[in-house]
Amino acid sequence: MTIRNSLVLVTGNQATSAVEAAFVLAEQARGHVTGLHVTGDAVMNMPSIIEGMTERQILQEFEAMRERLETSEATARDMFAATCARHGGQLVETPAPSGGVTASWEVVGGRPEKVLAEKARVYDLVVSSAGGDSADDAVLGAVETALFDAGRPVLVIPREAPKTIGRSILIGWNRTANAARAVMAAMPMIEAADQVTICHVNTGAKPGPSPEELAASLAWHGVDAKVRYITAGGVAVSDLLMTEAANIGGDLVIMGAYSHSRMREFVLGGVTRHALRHVVTPLLMMH
């Protein structure tokens, strides 16, 4: 199966890199990209200070909010269309598997985390930005919710859009079922890669197949994967994987998401939450 039908979240202050990455993948797979812009209702987005305003001031604030939402939508749509054109894509309204890059645009009102998780369930892949200290909290929350509730792999893009994705792949293998699901979801990309490296960070023995066993399994798909072991040494696992990816010239990291419960990750933090905030190389995750 080839990843042909991607959904990219075109909301937030870093959406440009995600849109660019989605079309890079579409060019490689001759696939389709749906741009999803989530816009809130003007009433829902009104500031709490309206309680002390006069009726006239409330109406003025409402109109200003409506105009801001419309401007945001228009800006996102124009950026999406321009990126599509730059990659030789064609905007279509119905499926047209003609062998070239195609795209469509959709605007939905509501909360980003709910809309993205529900819409994503009928796509091959979800693409979004999320990294950095200045990341939009609403987008970060949407990505986290999609990982739990969409049932689809999520590709997280750093601030700088990559020129290639999937030529040199690093698999972060921790023996868990989540990592296995991530590898299976990414098999079309793994089979097409020029180089695949399986990286195991020694954080303590976990039950499950070894990296060598994963490599042997991938060999049945014609994948000659190399195995590397890294000692944690108190450094965040996701940071180690990103560093190793940079060392081997990797342009995609694959790892499982959320080995612990969602509440524990939220309260105590964890590998996944840290990874989403510190993406340097495109990161494909699956829960």
Image: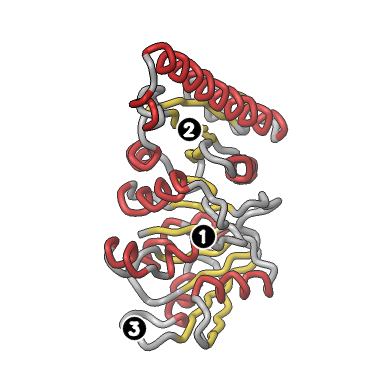
Front: mark 3 or 2: 2
Front one among 202 and 76: 76
Circle nearer the N terminus (1, 2): 2
> Mark 3 sits on what residue?
206
Judged from the image, the secondary structure of the residue bearing numbered disc 3 is loop
Question: In the rendered view, does 204 fall on the left or right side of 92?
Answer: left
Against 3, is 11 above or below? above
Task: Give neighbour class at mark 3: few <14, some 14-19, many 20+ (Cα, 10 Å).
Answer: few
Front one among 91 and 160: 160
Front one among 71 and 194: 71
Q: Is residue 202 visible?
A: yes
Residue at the extreme top = 56
Judged from the image, the secondary structure of the residue bearing numbered disc 2 is strand
The circle drawn on residue 277 is: 1
- Percent across and percent down for residue 159 are 63, 51
Front: mark 1 or 2: 1
